Image (spheres, grey):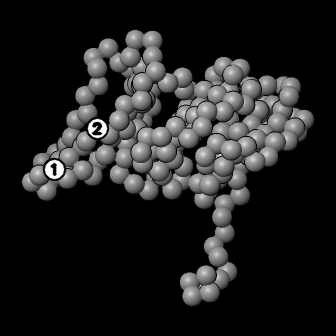
């Protein structure tokens, strides 16, 4: 279509794209792709200005050889969780994407699901009874990967965060 700019991101020819996700409140794009027998995760800035002032796509970083089956941006961006939930290990990697720092590598054995809370400060990992019929439990983590709470719940099937209600205080009172 005329007058609509198009940018192309090229990946190695032998790669298969597994997933893509835009940062919820920013201009970054994450692309997870398999190249031979490893998974790489590339981060791009979609609002980079070149020397002429034009917006271009810029590769920020490629994290190589990740063992992930899912990744989740925090709702406010800046942080990303890489989760390996397809195996019994249930490993979790907490990343700060601003400086590409690995904040923590943790493990929740047999975890089947993960979910950020609406504020982006906490993460929930749990073992769903729908997929694993024993040892159903959940763990609450902070965004840096510190475990805050753990509890077993027989036949735990689904957990979700409650939406954050609007504040009853005015801006001045806040």
Secondary structure at badge 2 equals strand
The residue at the point 43 percent across, 40 percent down is 100
Quadrant of the drawing holding the N terminus: top left
Examine the rendered structure and indicate whether residue 159 appears above or below residue 17: below
Residue that badge 1 annotates: 50
Image side of residue 117 versus residue 12, left or right? right
Q: Distance between the residues labelled 1 and 2?
A: 13 Å
Mark 2 crowdedness (10 Å alpha carbons): few <14, some 14-19, many ≥20: some
Q: How many labels does the image show?
A: 2
- Are discs 1 and 2 less than 8 Å apart at CB? no
Q: Position of residue 168 (x, y in %)?
A: 67, 80
The residue at the point 14 percent across, 53 percent down is 54
Tell me, for residue 59, which label it has, or none.
Answer: 2
| Residue 26 found in image quarter | bottom left
Residue 114 shows in the view: yes
Examine the rendered structure and indicate whether residue 106 appears above or below residue 26: above
The residue at the point 42 percent across, 24 percent down is 64
Closer to the camera in the image, 160 or 75: 75
Image side of residue 149 versus residue 95, left or right? right
């Amino acid at each position: 279509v005329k007058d609509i700019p198009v940018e192309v991101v090229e990946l190695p020819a032998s790669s298969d794209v597994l997933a893509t996700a835009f940062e919820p409140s920013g201009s970054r794009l994450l692309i997870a792709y398999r190249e031979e027998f490893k998974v790489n995760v590339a981060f791009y800035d979609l609002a980079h200005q070149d020397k002429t002032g034009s917006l271009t796509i810029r590769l920020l970083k490629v994290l190589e050889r990740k063992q992930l089956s899912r990744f989740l941006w925090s709702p406010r961006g800046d942080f990303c969780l890489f989760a390996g939930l397809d195996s019994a290990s249930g490993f979790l990697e907490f990343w700060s994407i601003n400086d590409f720092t690995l904040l923590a590598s943790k493990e929740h054995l047999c975890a089947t699901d993960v979910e950020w809370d609406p504020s982006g400060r906490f993460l929930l990992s749990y073992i769903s009874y729908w997929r694993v019929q024993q040892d159903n439990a959940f763990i609450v983590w902070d965004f840096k990967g510190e475990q805050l709470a753990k509890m077993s719940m027989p036949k735990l099937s689904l957990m979700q965060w409650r939406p954050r209600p609007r504040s009853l205080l005015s801006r001045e009172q806040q």
